[in-house]
Amino acid sequence: MLWRRHDPLRTNFINRDLNKIKYQFIIDLIMKNIAVIVSSGKNEKEKVLTALTFANVAKKNKLFNDVTLILFGPVEKLVAEGDKDVLKMLDDFASLGEKPVACQVVANNFNITTDLQKLQNLKVDMVGPIIKDLAEKDYEFLTF
């Protein structure tokens, strides 16, 4: 069997390429975009507050490249009824530069659209197209 001599030049190129891959992997992890979808309702307020806390901390500390907050389902009733804890967390999120979005179709079905539209720090919109757009942009989804 013939042994090849160690080629330091070739080894350096391989190591450099491996380091590039490692760094890119780390950057990809850090630069992920996430969408936090909250649908839990009154009976699961703790879960709602957990989701909103996570979204706020992630956005404030720039744990991800982007954090989008979507309210989709019974949580919208909790907001429309004026739950102080939830409203405070939504205001905190909006103060970080992006308003949370509530689903207009769900709000219409619950007859709470007007109540939600009165809130300054909440956008009421069709979330189906928003979710589709985020999925096409390779966002990761966290649902609560």
Image (cartoon, rainbow, N blue to C red):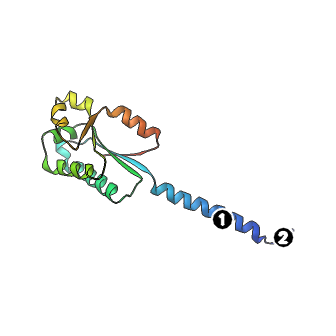
The residue at 30%/54% (across/down) is: 54
The residue mark sitting in front, 1 or 2, is 1
Vertically, is 48 above or below 130? below
First-in-chain label (1 vs 2): 2
Total marks placed: 2
| Callout 2: SS | loop
Q: What residue do we see at 35% from left, 32% from top?
A: 128
Residue type at mark 1?
A: Arg
Task: Place residue 143 in its image quadrant.
Answer: top left
Residue placed under numbered mark 2 in the picture: 3
- Residue 33 location (% of width, % of height): 42, 49
> Residue 135's image quarter?
top left
> Looking at this view, is 78 or 133 the one in front?
133
In the image, what residue occupies the spot 39% across and 48% down? 34
Q: Residues within 10 Å of mark 1 (few under 14, many from 20)?
A: few
| Residue occupying the point 12% across, 43% down | 82
Image location of residue 16, percent across then percent down = 66, 65
Q: Is residue 30 left or right of residue 37?
A: right
Q: Nearer the viewer, residue 72 or 67?
A: 67
Three-letter code, disc 2: Trp
Identify the residue under disc 1: 16
- Residue 76's x, y, as percent? 21, 38
Residue at disc 1, secondary structure = helix
Q: Quadrant of the N terminus?
A: bottom right
Residue lying farthest right? 2
Q: Which mark is residue 137?
A: none
Q: CA separation, marks 1 and 2?
A: 24 Å
Pinpoint residue 17: horizontal percent, then vertical percent.
Answer: 65, 61
Q: Residues within 10 Å of mark 2 (few under 14, many from 20)?
A: few
